[in-house]
Image (cartoon, rainbow, N blue to C red):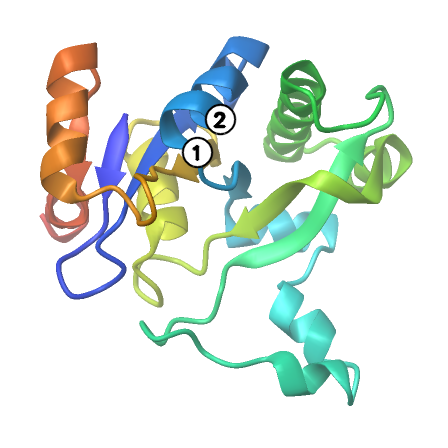
Amino acid sequence: MLLYDFDGREEEVDMVFYGGAVTWKSIRTLRSMAGGLICYATGKEEAEALGIPFQVDLLRSNNELAKLVKRPKYQDEPAFSVWVNHVETKTGISDEDRAITIRKLHEIIKDILKGKQARDIFYNEFYSPGHVPILISRGIGARRGHTELSITLVEQLGLERSVVFAEMLDEKTSLKKDDAMKIARSNGFIFLEGKEILKGVLA
């Protein structure tokens, strides 16, 4: 699926996959067709269950690094948390390695929902820094970025809060909405805008 946020915000399109369906081919598609940073995202409740904070909070805990915390032009604080690899990976960066890390992260999210001791599994099976950044949804009421929109969408579909996405890039700049819509039509992708997801929330 291709997801556009909003006019007047980032005005960017991300290619999005459900975390439970990711394979190495999905990662290759994100890398070759989208081109932006490949990120894994989950909900705030899941992150709290694992004990992983927002990266800005980690930076603020250090007096020097706190100076780096500034809001981007669209004003929302970033959704980034920690970057991880699964212990089964080699270098962590190959399509297969990132797919392994993401599949294992998805399993952790399922374990949380089943009431299992997911936190212990997480800290035993992952290490940081790694090659897969974890992003945390702040909730669609607090922030309306791709992280929140994609997590809201899987919630509406009755799926686990587990997604993978990458921004779509063009030469020199981000891919424009109209060009992304053409790619969606040519390749059979669903194209959604943030305002369409909000309709489902507000309905």
Quarter of the rendering containing residue 116:
top right
Q: Are marks 2 and 1 in contact (CB under 8 Å)?
A: yes
Residue 5 coordinates in the image, percent (x, y) = 23, 50
Q: Secondary structure at mark 1?
A: loop
Whether residue 124 sits left or right of residue 117 in the image: it is right
Residue drawn at (53%, 54%) of the image: 44
What amino acid is found at the position of numbered circle 1 in the picture? Answer: Gly
Whether residue 155 sits left or right of residue 70 in the image: it is left
Residue located beneath label 1 in the image = 35
Q: Is residue 183 visible?
A: yes
Residue with the most extreme front position: 172
Residue drawn at (51%, 41%) of the image: 37
Residue drawn at (60%, 26%) of the image: 106
Whether residue 156 sits left or right of residue 151 in the image: it is left
Residue drawn at (57%, 57%) of the image: 80
Residue located beneath label 2 in the image = 31
Residue 4 coordinates in the image, percent (x, y) = 21, 44
